[in-house]
């Protein structure tokens, strides 16, 4: 069963991911493995659909290298990212976007240090310098109608987004990389322990995030009821 984006991020973060056994005898925990894990666990695609045939950036520059990808993603140039976009650099590097932060991206990324200094899958801020662009999910989240509680320039506050394909709602904060899918608003449970229970994950919240969430859900419920 496919995971929601939030659940996948929660499970993948702080883990070592290898989905292809490559490169044999080397550091098998490559940035490319995060891309493979993302398309497999969130989109139920086989990892063969993410094959690069060499440098990971070929997934972008030769898109769609594997035809089925074009059913799920559209290739767009560098610019403002949306949560769930897959960002490619020519270095080569690939990372999955949690939030756009202007000149940089808050991502889930593995092996940022290069093979001589392997790094597990971490929430990492990466510069947009040299960015090739993004593969954007076709069920993209678009900033919308529900963003009632904040000014455009204030990135410290979360925004609400509506997934135009499914009608589900998500909350994201650009400055902190704070992100939730809210797949079924009526089913969201706010736990007294200040966790958000969504889908299969319990997301730990700090006091500020908790307060924001209460406000956001009040707005969302009023808007969608
Ligand atoms: Ca690998």
Image (tube, grey):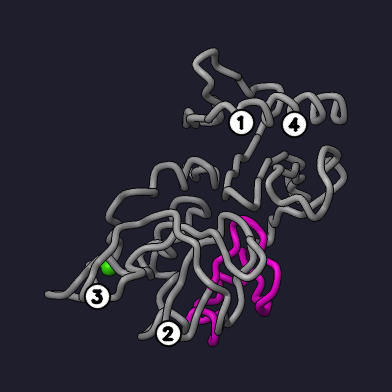
The quarter in which the C terminus is drawn is top right
The label shown at residue 208 is 1
Classify 204 as above or below 43.
above
Marks 3 and 4, how far apart at CA: 42 Å
Question: Tag 2: Cα neighbours inside 10 Å, few (<14), some, or many (≥20)?
Answer: few
Q: With respect to residue 160, does 28 lie above or below?
A: below
Q: Earlier in the sequence, mark 3 or mark 2?
A: 2
Pick whichever of labels 3 and 1 is earlier in the sequence: 3
Q: Position of residue 198 (x, y in %)?
A: 56, 29
Considering the numbered disc 2 on the image, is that residue within a helix, a strand or a loop?
A: loop
Q: Which mark is residue 115?
A: 3
Q: Residue furthest top?
A: 192
x and y percent of residue 204 in the render? 48, 30
Q: Disc 3 beta carbon < 8 A from ligand 1? A: no
User: Is residue 85 on the magenta stretch?
Assistant: yes
**Label located before the other in sequence (4 or 2):** 2
Mark nearer the N terminus (3 vs 4): 3
Q: Which mark is residue 91?
A: 2
Of callouts 1 and 2, the N-terminal one: 2
**Ligand 1 quarter of the rendering:** bottom left
Q: Residue at x 62, y 72 (%)?
A: 70
**Answer yes or no: do the residues labelled 4 and 2 have beta carbons within 8 Å?**
no
Q: Which residues are magenta?
A: 59-87
- Residue drawn at x 58%, y 44% is 178
The Cα atoms of the two marked residues, 3 and 2, are separated by 13 Å
Nearer to us of marks 1 and 2 is: 1
In the image: residue 83, left or right of residue 218:
left
Element type at marker 1?
A: helix
Q: Earlier in the sequence, mark 4 or mark 1?
A: 1
Residue 88 placement (x, y as % from top left) = 52, 76
Which of the numbered marks, if any, corresponds to residue 216? 4
């Amino acid at each position: 069963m496919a995971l929601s984006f939030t659940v996948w991020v929660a499970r993948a973060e702080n883990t070592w991911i290898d989905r292809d056994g490559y490169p044999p005898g080397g550091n098998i925990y490559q940035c490319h493995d995060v891309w493979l894990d993302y398309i497999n666990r969130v989109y139920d695609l086989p990892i063969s659909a993410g094959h690069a045939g060499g440098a990971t950036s070929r997934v972008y520059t030769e898109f769609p290298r594997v035809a089925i990808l074009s059913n799920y993603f559209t290739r767009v140039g560098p610019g403002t990212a949306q949560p769930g976009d897959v960002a490619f650099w020519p270095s080569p590097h690939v990372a999955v976007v949690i939030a756009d932060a202007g000149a940089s991206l808050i991502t889930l990324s593995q092996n940022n240090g290069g093979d001589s200094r392997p790094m597990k899958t971490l929430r990492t801020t990466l510069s947009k310098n040299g960015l090739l662009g993004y593969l954007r999910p076709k069920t993209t989240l678009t900033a919308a109608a529900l963003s009632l509680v904040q000014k455009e320039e204030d990135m410290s506050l979360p925004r609400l987004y509506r997934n135009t394909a499914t009608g589900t709602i998500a909350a994201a904060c650009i400055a902190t990389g704070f992100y939730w899918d809210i797949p079924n608003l009526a089913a969201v449970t706010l736990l007294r322990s200040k966790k958000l229970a969504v889908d299969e994950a319990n997301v730990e919240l700090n006091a500020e995030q908790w307060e924001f969430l209460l406000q956001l859900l009040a707005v969302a419920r009023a808007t969608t009821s």
